[in-house]
Amino acid sequence: MSAYPPPLFILAPPRSYTSVVCGVIGQHPELFGMPELNLFQAPTVDEFWTGRRADGKLRSPFWRIMRHDGVLRAIAELYAGEQTIDSVEMAKRWLIVRARKSTAEAHREICAKAGPQILLDKSPGYVRRAEYLRRILVAFPEARFIHLVRHPRGQCESVLKAENGRITAFFMGAIDRSGAEPVIDPQTVWRDAHFEILRFLSELPRGRWMRIIGEDFMNDISGGAREVCHWLGVSDAPAAIEEMLHPERSPFACIGPANARLGNDPNFLNSPALRPARVERAPLEGPLPWRPDQKGFSPEVLKLARYFGYS
């Protein structure tokens, strides 16, 4: 039997309230909420660290910028008890000396260090490919999962409003080529990510995962927090729920040191405290403002969104 509990993973495409939901759940006293670790996007620590596949080809010119800050901050905090330039340099060495290990082995070490708390990992990149999700299950056969859903209109608008949003969408493969001219359209990423998640979860026992509708969670965070506690089997005492209402108390809920500044949504890092506001559900029908042809959602997206309860 493992010396630490199986980890919990949030599965969702980017800009799906992942930072807030992870921040809330991760503040429960029996959990340890992480920044984006991203480890399972590569098979080995060497490939994760260098961004080069076994054949020497570079995975992405942005790999080192996009993938490393979260895991460096996590290792620094867990092993040094602080996040400073020096402790992040130590975290880099921690990864380098494990270059020949699998990312599963590295993740298990991090889980063991966080134990007895349940490690919570939210890395939106995991839902891009089935092989990333399979790596999680091979490493942690008893892992649990939260499927987090945001309305496709709200998620797509958030992607495009982010800094360099259109460029990010392009590199995420959010391109509709069905017309005469290619169009950047994030709905393709929303659709593909949730199809991938549904396929993955269909192979797991129902008790191993739960679905959270992001707008419902944001409109009743205390109620959503209690629902998660009941499902996980952790305390829902008033003190535990109160702690969950303060994601800003996480050691990762701020900009990090100069050599590992991010690891999470910059908007969340700059303003992590919960703010009272009601999130309204946007309409499914109608033209999409980011499309020059003013087309609406595709039939596949409409069907999937209605399946999740949007109307």
Image: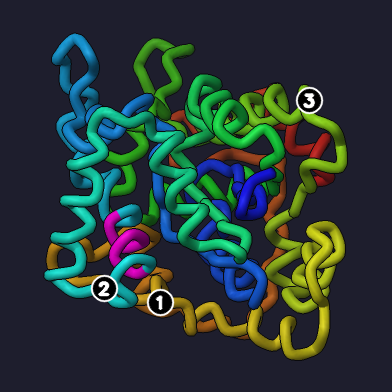
Give the residue at mark 1.
251
- Residue 98 percent coordinates (x, y): 26, 38
Kindly check if marks 1 and 2 are in contact, taking CB atoms under 8 A apart as contact.
yes
- Residue 57 percent coordinates (x, y): 16, 15
Quarter occupied by residue 183: top left
- Of the 4 image quadrants, the one containing the N terminus is top right
The answer to whether residue 291 is visible is no
Tell me the distance, in whole angstroms, between the alpha carbons under discs 2 and 3: 39 Å
Identify the mark at residue 202; answer none if there is no mark: 3
Query: Callout 1, which amino acid?
Result: Pro
**Please, is residue 42 above or below residue 284 in the view?**
above
Say which residue appears at 20% left-offset and 41% top-offset: 97
Give the residue at mark 2.
83
Quarter occupied by residue 25: bottom right
Tell me the distance, in whole angstroms, between the alpha carbons under discs 3 and 1: 35 Å
Tell me the distance, in whole angstroms, between the alpha carbons under discs 1 and 2: 8 Å
* Magenta residue span: 72-77
- The overriding secondary structure of the stretch rendered in magenta is helix
